[in-house]
Image (cartoon, rainbow, N blue to C red):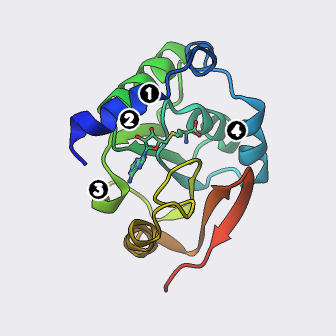
Amino acid sequence: MSRSLADRSWNRLLTPTYLVAMMSGALSPRLRSIVDALPLRPGLSVLEIGCGPGACCREIARRIGHGFVLGIDRSAAAIAAARRTSQAEGAPEWLRFRHIAAEAYEALPSDPAFDVVFAVRVGALDGRHPQAGRMIVSRLAAVLSPHGAMYVEKEGKLVEVPVPR
Ligand SMILES: C[S@@+](CC[C@H](N)C(=O)[O-])C[C@H]1O[C@@H](n2cnc3c(N)ncnc32)[C@H](O)[C@@H]1O
């Protein structure tokens, strides 16, 4: 998908409710329940695929203290919104956002291995596009820590994804 098409898809999500949540930086009850279900501990490194405006990443960065939280999204508009809101909120320096599609993800030398990788409402990972999902899972398996795990949201529930090791 071209960058502008990714952005057009993302812009269609900008309903009034979503915009209010995004502008206030608030975490919706739906996203809070997902964050609550993740096995978070202080100091973990966490990667969110398809972070959108970054609400989950900001909440996780608050919860884990000095760790590493990276949100990636194939939409430049989503990443710009995530960075803007995070900066306005005074987000910690261990929270980062990067404009890249999951299927193209490559770790930078400064990235740690990830203890938790997760995705919420991302078509390639929630079963809507199984072939793309398999490709992303095998690519991201390479950046998981030895005890790391990958989770996707399916119908409101967080499900662990089997990862090839
Ligand atoms: C429905 S939104 C969900 C955003 C956020 N996870 C939430 O639940 O509020 C899906 C997001 O995933 C992004 N996305 C979809 N496919 C992706 C891919 N292959 N790699 C990275 N981001 C992707 C979209 O650009 C969009 O921002």
Q: CA distance from mark 4 to mark 1?
A: 19 Å
Whether tag 4 and tag 1 are in contact, CB under 8 A, the answer is no
Q: Find out if the beta carbon at label 4 lies less than 8 Å from the nearest ligand 1 atom.
A: yes
Can you tell which of label 1 and label 3 is closer to the viewer?
1
- For residue 77, side relative to residue 145 (left or right): left
Badge 4 or badge 1: first in the primary sequence: 1
Q: CA distance from mark 4 to mark 2?
A: 20 Å
Q: CA distance from mark 1 to mark 3?
A: 31 Å
Q: Vertically, is 28 above or below 15? A: below
Q: Which residue is mark 2?
A: 9
Q: Which residue is mark 1?
A: 12
Q: CA distance from mark 2 to mark 1?
A: 5 Å
Whether tag 2 and tag 1 are in contact, CB under 8 A, the answer is yes
Amino acid identity at mark 2: Ser
Q: CA distance from mark 3 to mark 2?
A: 27 Å
- For residue 118, side relative to residue 101 (left or right): right
For the view shown, which residue lies furthest in the bottom direction?
165
Q: Which residue is mark 3?
A: 108
